[in-house]
Amino acid sequence: MGCTSPLLAQTPAPDPHDAQPERPTVATHAGTVAPGWLEIEAGTEFDRYADGSRGGSAPVLFKIGLASHVQLGVQTPLAWPPNAGGAGGGLAAGDVLTSLKWRLADRAPILGRFAIEPALKWPTGSSASGAGTGTTDLSLLVISSHSLGPVSMDLNAGWTRRSGDGAAAPRNATLWTASFGGPAAGPVGWAAEIYGYPATAGPAGARSIVAVLAGPTLQVRDWLVLDTGVIAPLTGPQPRAIYAGLTWNVGRLWRP
């Protein structure tokens, strides 16, 4: 998951120790962590599917600033895949994902604060349990962030190409998101999003998904932001879900 940050979308964080949440939404913003700094995002999501099965995930994302406009991301998720008619199928390690967000512009015409984020997902999770796909995935995300007064808006479009024969997961997949966030009262803010996964082809192909996400955020400190909320499907096999998590700007690891 990414997040619409309550921070202004078109200007860098005023202090490198300020948290810049990419969660809880599917979208991410175009901002990057300051060079030499570490930020950690962690959360959990509990899913309930239409057939009564339940599952969930607990992703942890490590964000490290490599340069003034470049951020390394390493995500190490845990998952409990669903079992029909009952609880999840047990906790298992998911696929590790590495990404490199490159902020290309802060005030570009039309695009606003603009970044691209290529990523590589490794087949480290168990495909037998459903926690991993058993495929190596190459993806590219295009990110456009804007400030609409006190409200931030993040628009994402992405494409993924997977290895394998399409039996475990579709060879090609796309996504789109429109995410919004802003202040509510004092340290309390809000995040809301509509997102979609267009239909995929092949043996593991699935119908298109469109869903909405919404919930409050709480800025405990400049460097610590909490979030919680719900996810509801509009079309397709998206499960209903609740989530909670945090973004913690740990501090400087080295001086660039």
Image (tube, rainbow, N blue to C red):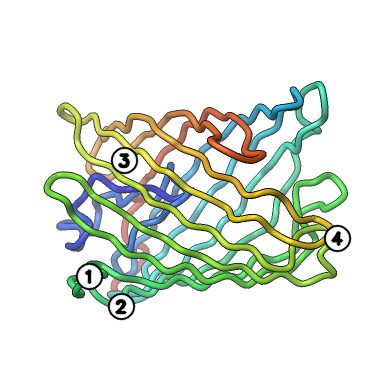
Q: Distance between the residues labelled 4 and 2?
A: 37 Å
Question: Mark 3 or mark 1, which is nearer to you?
Answer: 1
Residue located 36% across and 38% down the image: 192
Tell me which numbered mark, 1 or 4, is placed earlier along the sequence. 1
Q: How far apart are marks 2 and 3 (CA)?
A: 27 Å
Q: Mark 4 points at which residue?
A: 167
Judge the density around disc 2: few (<14), some (14-19), many (≥20) Cα neighbours within 10 Å: some
Q: Name the residue under label 3.
A: 224
As helix, strand or loop, the secondary structure at mark 2 comes to: strand
* Mark 3 residue type: Leu
Taking 247 as reference, is 62 above or below it? Answer: below
Question: Mark 1 or mark 4, which is nearer to you?
Answer: 1
x then y, percent, for residue 185: 16, 27
As helix, strand or loop, the secondary structure at mark 1 comes to: loop
Q: How far apart are marks 4 and 3 (CA)?
A: 41 Å
Q: Name the residue under label 1.
A: 110
* Mark 4 residue type: Ala
Q: How many marks?
A: 4
As helix, strand or loop, the secondary structure at mark 3 comes to: strand
* Mark 2 residue type: Leu
